[in-house]
């Protein structure tokens, strides 16, 4: 059991070197109000005047005090193990018999055989960090005391709890001290030594109150009652020491400190302990053997050993887990670069491979939050681009009037007997041209996704690149440049695919020929049905007469009837008679048409009708569309529209198939095939090696910190492994 406390001291030394608080080691923290005698208790345990003393706030930084018991017969061997350099210099011979000495962590291997020098160093170090005022700091001072007169202990002396700022102390000094104390005593592996003066009421003890906050069950709180000799005359601490006032599970121990006068008169700690024993025998004879500084030291030693024994298995597991974590972390930071050429080539090759694997879908790190890489490109081709093309209306932007105008323009000055093919070509090219914009947008989306893959590889796949920010930037620049270089080539190819379709309208296309044959059959059948539905002919004597008494043709009759309708019912009647623009409706009543067309016709007729009182000026009349479409014109328009729709669907199918293939060949596959050679050609140059493989300072520092921590954890693991299992129980 005695071997356990030195083990913890060794662990504390190991972790102090890396300045880490990741392991919560078992220790004893001394808590109490200001001037309650905390430092005096510690001095009594050490047996020497080692701590700064006085009124007001003296302890302004945590002092981690490790007491190491050395055998007088074997102290030279111990010294050689711990302070080999100091023994070689013969410095220990300057102490009192060379038996006791101290050592600070911040002064490395310097030995302090004079305890007045130790006290002075504590004051100097406190002022160095906390200043000359009354301010505090949470940075601890580490002091080791080697002596044959002490028991093995690890204690933490904390600043006293205060309420009112004095001097230049900040207004929140109470809060600062409280947070500092809680930082130490919140450690579940810490034993709390709650110090309270006997000449104050135990019920008002701040130390016990703070201890109870973090240790409500009192499993790790030991109460110490100081200044037993300063109680009012006629009172004693019997009830307190018996635990009748406030029971504490680990017990209450009373001690007598040296007064300030005793300190000023250089009264030794040994004499004070002797006087304390005499006082206890006289005042509390029944409790003398369970109180006093010596009993406190033995109790603390026993409590700490048992506490360490309970904490050690968990501590061992924690150290092993942390060692594995830091080993993994250090591995992710990579080794320092030795062969620059080899390292650069490996990184370039790895990035190029990961980039290609991300496109192929074989990357190690598969994204689960969203589509990326090749899957995203597939989505663009078949979902985004495919659906966009399918949503394009084959006759979008074309009205029946546009079709009729194109037919008439194609015939020239002569009336046509048949529908001119030129009008079909002109109109179908206009519609096919609309497929170019979504095709180019598809190329742009794939280009953007390939840009995103660069960042994906940097973040997830090639963490080594983060070590070399300049290399990372250079790789991103080269890949971006390559993609930018391929973009115009791919766009040109896609543009050409549409241009190829526009260059030759293949009316002999098998799918188009089938559609034409089917369409002709349908039209012929519809014509026969329409003829059967026509009313009987109007008798000549009942035919309509014109204004001059002459007979009117059927077309003129329709126009005249329309004029009468306009006169009688106005625009509302015209709107009511408006049809859907199909040729069946035209033959049915001779009056149906698209609402737009009808509106245009009505406007023109209203402007130029002689019956309205306007003179007809032929020079002012634009395209003669004032009348309704004849049955033949309606049929011609419908034929052209059906042909356009049939041919457009064939071209759209071709474009939907060929654009993804062109993008894959000219952009995606080309970048995949030439990426590594491009990277090597641009970056693998002797003049760039030093610059590209310059690590960020942050990365180098983190690697060193991780390496130091791993070394400390491995050393700690060895220290714990030296304890035989039998020592634990």
Image (cartoon, rainbow, N blue to C red):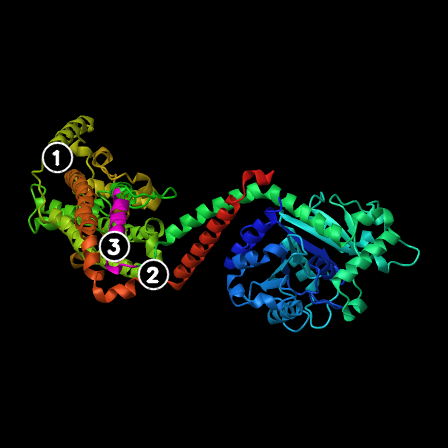
Q: Distance between the residues labelled 1 and 2?
A: 57 Å
Does the rendering let one see residue 463?
A: yes
Residue 325 is left or right of residue 566, and the answer is right
The part of the chain drawn in magenta is: 338-360
Ranked by sequence position, the earlier of labels 1 and 3 is 3
Does the rendering let one see residue 198?
A: no
Disc 3: which residue: 348
Residue count near mark 3 (Cα–Cα under 10 Å), binned few <14, some 14–19, many ≥20:
many
Q: Where is residue 666 in the image (x, y as percent from the top left)?
A: 17, 50
Give yes or no for residue 184 being in the magenta stretch. no
Which residue is pictured at 75% across the width and 60% down the height?
A: 270
Q: For marks 1 and 3, give the one nearer the viewer.
A: 3
Disc 3, SS: helix
The image quarter containing residue 527 is: top left
Identity of the residue furthest to the right in this view: 234
The residue nearer to you, when weighing 246 against 99, is 99
Q: How far apart are marks 1 and 3 (CA)?
A: 50 Å
Which residue is pictured at 52% across the width and 42% down the height?
A: 317
Ranked by sequence position, the earlier of labels 3 and 2 is 3
Disc 1: which residue: 511
Q: Distance between the residues labelled 3 and 2?
A: 14 Å
Which residue is pictured at 61% across the width and 55% down the height?
A: 73
Residue 432 is left or right of residue 314, and the answer is left
Disc 2: which residue: 469
Ranked by sequence position, the earlier of labels 1 and 2 is 2
């Amino acid at each position: 059991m005695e071997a356990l406390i030195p083990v913890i001291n060794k662990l504390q030394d190991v972790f102090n070197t890396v300045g880490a608080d990741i392991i919560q080691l078992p220790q004893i923290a001394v808590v109490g109000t200001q001037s309650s005698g905390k430092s005096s208790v510690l001095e009594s345990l050490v047996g020497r005047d080692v701590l700064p003393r006085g009124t007001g706030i003296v302890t302004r930084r945590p002092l981690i005090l490790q007491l190491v018991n050395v055998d007088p017969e074997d102290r030279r061997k111990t010294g050689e193990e711990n302070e080999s350099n100091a023994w070689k210099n013969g410095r220990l011979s300057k102490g009192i018999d060379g038996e006791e000495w101290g050592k600070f962590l911040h002064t490395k291997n310097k030995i302090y055989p004079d305890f007045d020098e130790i006290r002075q160093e504590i004051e100097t170090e406190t002022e160095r960090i906390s200043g000359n005022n009354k301010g505090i700091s949470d940075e601890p001072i580490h002091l080791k005391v080697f002596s044959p007169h002490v028991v093995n202990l690890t204690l933490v002396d904390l600043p006293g709890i205060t309420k009112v700022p004095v001097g230049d102390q900040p207004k929140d000094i109470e809060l600062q001290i409280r947070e500092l104390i809680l930082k130490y005593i919140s450690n579940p592996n810490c034993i709390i030594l709650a110090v309270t003066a006997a000449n104050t009421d135990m019920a008002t003890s701040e130390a016990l109150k703070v201890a109870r906050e973090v240790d409500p069950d009192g499993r790790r709180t030991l109460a110490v009652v100081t200044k037993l000799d300063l109680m009012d005359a006629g009172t004693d601490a019997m009830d307190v020491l018996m635990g009748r006032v406030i029971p504490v599970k680990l017990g209450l121990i009373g001690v007598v400190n040296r007064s300030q006068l005793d300190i000023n008169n250089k009264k030794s700690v040994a004499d004070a302990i002797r006087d304390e024993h005499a006082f206890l025998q006289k005042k509390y004879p029944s409790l003398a053997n369970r109180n006093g500084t010596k009993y406190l030291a033995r109790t603390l030693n026993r409590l700490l050993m048992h506490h360490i024994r309970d904490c050690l298995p968990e501590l061992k597991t924690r150290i092993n887990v942390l060692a594995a974590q830091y080993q993994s972390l250090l591995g992710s930071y990579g080794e320092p670069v030795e062969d620059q050429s080899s390292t650069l080539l490996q990184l370039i090759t790895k990035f190029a491979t990961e980039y290609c694997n991300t496109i192929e879908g074989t990357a190690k790190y598969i994204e689960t939050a969203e589509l990326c890489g090749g899957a995203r490109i597939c989505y663009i081709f078949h979902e985004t681009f495919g659906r966009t093309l399918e949503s394009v209306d084959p006759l979008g932007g074309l009205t029946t009037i546009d079709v009729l105008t194109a037919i008439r323009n194609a015939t020239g000055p002569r009336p046509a007997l048949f529908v001119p093919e030129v009008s079909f070509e002109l109109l179908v090219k206009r519609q096919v041209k609309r497929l170019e914009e979504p095709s180019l947008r598809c190329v742009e989306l794939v280009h953007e996704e390939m840009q995103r893959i660069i960042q994906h590889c940097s973040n997830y796949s090639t963490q080594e690149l983060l070590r070399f920010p300049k290399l990372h930037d250079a790789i991103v620049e080269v890949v971006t440049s390559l993609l930018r270089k391929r973009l115009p080539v791919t766009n040109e190819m896609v543009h050409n695919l549409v241009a190829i379709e526009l260059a030759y309208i293949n009316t002999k296309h098998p799918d188009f020929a089938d559609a034409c044959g089917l369409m002709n059959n349908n039209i012929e059948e519809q014509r026969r049905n329409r003829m059967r539905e026509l009313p009987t002919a109007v008798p000549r004597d009942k035919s309509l007469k014109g204004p001059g008494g002459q007979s009117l043709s059927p077309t003129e009759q329709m126009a005249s009837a329309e004029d009468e309708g306009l006169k009688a019912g106005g625009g509302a009647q015209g709107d009511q008679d408006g049809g859907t623009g199909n040729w069946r409706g035209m033959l049915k009543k001779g009056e149906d048409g698209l609402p737009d067309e009808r509106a245009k016709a009505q406007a023109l007729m209203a402007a130029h009708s002689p019956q309205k009182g306007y003179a007809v000026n032929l020079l002012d009349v634009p395209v003669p569309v004032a009348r309704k479409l004849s049955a033949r014109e309606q049929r011609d328009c419908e034929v052209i529209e059906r042909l356009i729709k049939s041919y457009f669907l064939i071209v759209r199918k071709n474009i939907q198939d060929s654009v993804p293939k062109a993008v894959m060949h000219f952009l995606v596959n080309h970048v995949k095939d030439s990426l590594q050679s491009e990277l090597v050609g641009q970056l693998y140059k002797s003049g760039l090696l030093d610059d590209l493989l310059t690590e960020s300072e942050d990365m180098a520092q983190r690697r060193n910190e991780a390496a130091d921590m791993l070394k400390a954890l491995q050393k700690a693991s060895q220290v714990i492994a030296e304890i035989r299992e039998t020592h634990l129980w």
